[in-house]
Amino acid sequence: MENSISAHSSSDPMLDLYKAVAGSKQKHSSGLTGELGKLKRPRGGYSTEASITIRHPELNNNRWTNIPSLVLGQINVDRILEGNDPKVSPRQKKIAIKRALERQKAGAEYRSYDTVEKAVQAAIRRSKGKDIVRRHGGHIRAARKTR
């Protein structure tokens, strides 16, 4: 069965908090616990964010950008939390991109990079965790296939 976390109306406190943060133009790395909060991973531990590295013509002039995949409206969140390669399906990626574009329109900023390698290294540095190296290592291969 597919898990789904649906987008909420503006009466949702989490969305209101996000809008307040985005409205103040705070960066993506504001220290919040992600749009979905603290989520338990199947293999132990917790995640508040799982980033993916993408290029999109409407986001940072098609430059490599790290965006969160654990977002409002995301489906099958357990798959993302498992960290298998690829950890994000094409449909999940589309949902994450749509949400990033919505957040950008609301004032959020995402740092961009010249190469996929620089973007992934920035995501690794940001996470400061060993598990992300394995997951992003797989994602580099996936990103290169789409070039």
Image: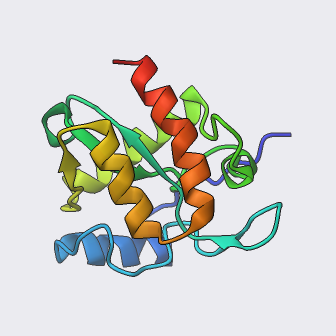
In this view, 129 is above or below 113: below
Tell me where residue 8 appears, x and y as whole percent. 52, 60
Of 132 and 32, which appears nearest the observer?
132
Residue 11 seen in the figure? no
* Percent coordinates x, y for residue 31 in the rendering: 39, 81
Across and down, in percent, residue 113 comes to 20, 45
Residue 53 visible within the image: yes
Quarter the C terminus occupies: top left
Judged left or right of residue 147, residue 27 is left
**Residue at position x 74%, y 73% from top?**
45
Residue in the picture at 50% in, 77% down: 33
Residue that extends furthest to the right in the rendered view of this protein: 1
98 versus 81 height, above or below: above
Q: Is residue 44 above or below residue 57?
A: below
Please give the name of the residue rendered at 73% of the width and 45% of the height, measured from the top-left corner. Answer: 79
Left or right of 113? Residue 69 is right
Residue 142 percent location from the top left of the image = 50, 27
